[in-house]
Amino acid sequence: MSEEKFTDINGKPISLECRSHSSFCREFVVSAPKVSLRAVMVCTCAVWLSAYAAFFVTKNTAVLSSAIVTTLVGMMVHIHLIKIDHERLLIVGSLGVQVSSCFASGRESATFIEMSSIKDIVINEAIHMQRVIYYLCILLKEPSDPNGVSGVVPLFQSSKPRLNCLVKIYKSCQEILGQC
């Protein structure tokens, strides 16, 4: 088990933890920093100060109540549906690949792809907002055409690691795919 520090495409720190369970089973966990208490406090204070200013002008207590409810619902939605703590890629040479995301609330989402439907794992590039972004993805086999690709499953969509981190994961995945 090794843990290395990397950065995402925006320069924010992320960590890569590599676990080798056997010669044909490896796990990669890309973790983002936890929710910043400072950012939560700033957003909450901004909403509540705006609500107090609106209350001062309108003298309507519904403004304050709606601000409190809005911030609480907003925080719950952010923690439960948006903020991902870590993303995990588990590759088992004889079975397939499991991709999972763990949210800040503890909720986990997982997808399994059988090895028989995987054509390859590649590093792809995309142009977004005048930048070239690299991402790791799984190419799915076309059932009727063995040389065709039926779909692309992007990996680490939330953490968005830079190319140096992706290359490390890619090389390890190719070792396992080469044994199959």
Image (spheres, rainbow, N blue to C red):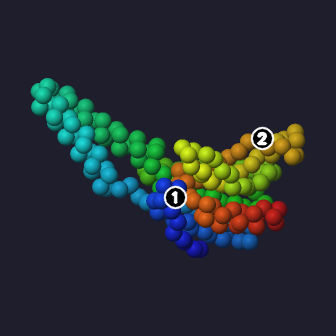
Q: Which mark is residue 150?
A: 2
Q: Between marks 2 and 1, how big is the CA–CA gap?
A: 29 Å
Q: In the shown orientation, is residue 121 left or right of residue 146?
A: left
Q: Residue 74, position in %: x, y?
A: 35, 40
Q: Can residue 92 be seen in this snapshot?
A: yes
- SS state under label 2: strand
Q: Nearer the viewer, residue 42 or 100?
A: 42
Q: Residue 174, position in %: x, y?
A: 75, 63
Q: Residue 145, position in %: x, y?
A: 88, 41
Q: Which mark is residue 8?
A: 1
Q: Which residue is found at the position 56% from the left and 46% from the top?
A: 130
Q: Quadrant of the N terminus?
A: bottom right
Q: In the shown orientation, is residue 92 left or right of residue 64?
A: right
| Corner quadrant of residue 51 | top left
Q: Which residue is found at the position 76% from the left and 46% from the top?
A: 140
Q: Is residue 30 above or below residue 56?
A: below
Q: Nearer the viewer, residue 154 or 132?
A: 132
Q: Is residue 108 above or below residue 145?
A: below
Q: Which residue is found at the position 20% from the left and 30% from the top?
A: 63
Callout in the foreground (2, 1): 1
Q: Nearer the viewer, residue 126 or 95?
A: 126
Name which residue type carries label 1: Asp
